[in-house]
Image: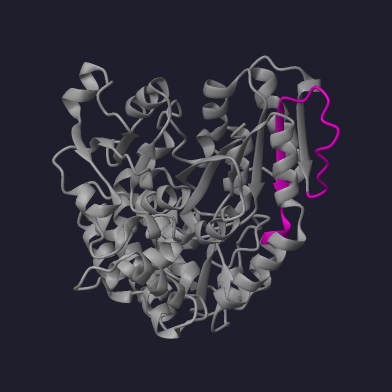
Amino acid sequence: MSKLISHIAAELKSYSTNVLVVENNDRFLYRKDVIVALSTLGIEISLGTSIEQRIAFELKESVEILLLVSQDNKNYLEDIQKNATRIEIKLSDFFSGYHLPSIKDLELRELDYLFRDQPVISLNKRETLRLIESLGTDHSHKSGSEFQLQDFRSTLTNSLQEDPINWTAIGHFISEAISQTIGEPVFDEVMELVHSANEKFQEELQTRYDQTKNSSAVKKPKIVSKILDYLSFNYKKEKVALIVIDGMSLWQHHLLKKKLSGSIQEHVIYSWIPSITQLSRQAIFRGDNPKTTYQQGPQNEERLWKQYWKSKGNHEFEIDYQHEKIDVENLGSVTKLALVFKELDDKIHSATDYKDLIDLTNNWFQRSDIYSVIKNLQNHGFTIFITSDHGNIQAKGWRALNHQEKIGTKKSGSRSERHIEYEEDWLPNEFLENNPDIQEKIARSENVLYFINNYSFSRKQTHVSHGGSHLLEVLIPFTIIKDEA
């Protein structure tokens, strides 16, 4: 975690209001890497016109810190001024002893090292440049970019004590930590903290998940079943392309977004629970609560997608759905496009653990056409929305179901090893009565049982799966990309 960004975030959160009108003349807060880094800690930055900032103010989530940034913070309407705190931020607030013009354009990694180890005696320009040059050759300086477990633990602990808890910020924060530490010795300790956070998340689901299913989609969707209503309300007359990457978690999305271009807005939404494709991806394309009688498949998804947009007044020739075999060269009059990439989910189910999966993920991003597809859609004037139907988790086997426990189960069309669906009510009751040791680790929804921790119905020591309600499965990306031009 960046000590510099964490320090800035803590300072911004110390104000009594969650809207800050910020004057930033050195334009440090205009940097895309700074904007992205602060967003992972629940701080959103609006740099647009006065109208765009007005919209950002109106649509602000109650738990976010919103920065309205400009180089002249005087031209705001009365209600914004009444509810906001005026501040000024500049790089010199956080750095002393360096020649500031020499460091202002450094990468965050390098700035972080300079922030952690500031000189007692001020350096002139030549001395500052000499120090910067040494960052690339002196391996001892790389400690500034190494993962800081104590910082992660402290920030996560503090975030979980907030009321209400900002799960969007925590989702980004945890995902960045996972993507940084996979394959490192510290990874197991990071995951222990993630599983502890999940215990809090399960409490959140018990009290608020049903409300989320009935939430408004006007400002943004909070759950997959509200994505289409959000698109219809806000982009009814525009060209929209909804990209669904099967099984992509937030930490995998962090890898994907590094190569995306354009104006990017990142949100976090809920998958359907239990987090299986048959329910969650159905909810996306139905634009409503899923039905248990639904048969999962691309033909049925296409039917739901077209049915929804026809109900909103669109013609058949304006609507297109593509599954795996993607062609965005000849879209003609299409204004409502859905694309489903399934191959990443195949990688997930073949992975032994996250170390295995991160290699498979990076390989898929490089080999697939995902980046060229996004670029072509931008060139065709589409606003692009990237999401997934559910995340995934590095699970550990509890044990496999025995023959008796399999009797009366239904096939959902999902490869999940973290849920069981029974035909009759008495069967889940019998299962729970016969297995009292895991009752606190299992949740029930009608005739479905699913794990809330990282267990699975498997003999495997570790493997990657989904189907439960762990925060790594439920908190998923919803990203909006617009061409900067």
In the displayed structure image, the side of residue 476 where residue 60 appears, left or right: left
Magenta stretch: dominant SS? loop
- Looking at the image, which is closer to me, 427 or 469? 469
Q: Is residue 158 visible?
A: yes
In the displayed structure image, the side of residue 38 where residue 63 appears, left or right: left
Residue under the point 48% across and 61% down: 450
Question: x and y percent of residue 25 in the render?
Answer: 32, 39
Question: x and y percent of residue 93 in the render?
Answer: 22, 53
Residue 191, image quadrant: bottom left
Residue under the point 44% across and 60% down: 106
Q: Which residues are magenta?
A: 324-344
- Looking at the image, which is closer to me, 114 or 66? 114
Whether residue 337 is in magenta: the answer is yes
Residue under the point 45% across and 71% down: 454
- Looking at the image, which is closer to me, 393 or 102? 102
Whether residue 192 is in magenta: the answer is no
Question: x and y percent of residue 135 in the render?
Answer: 44, 75
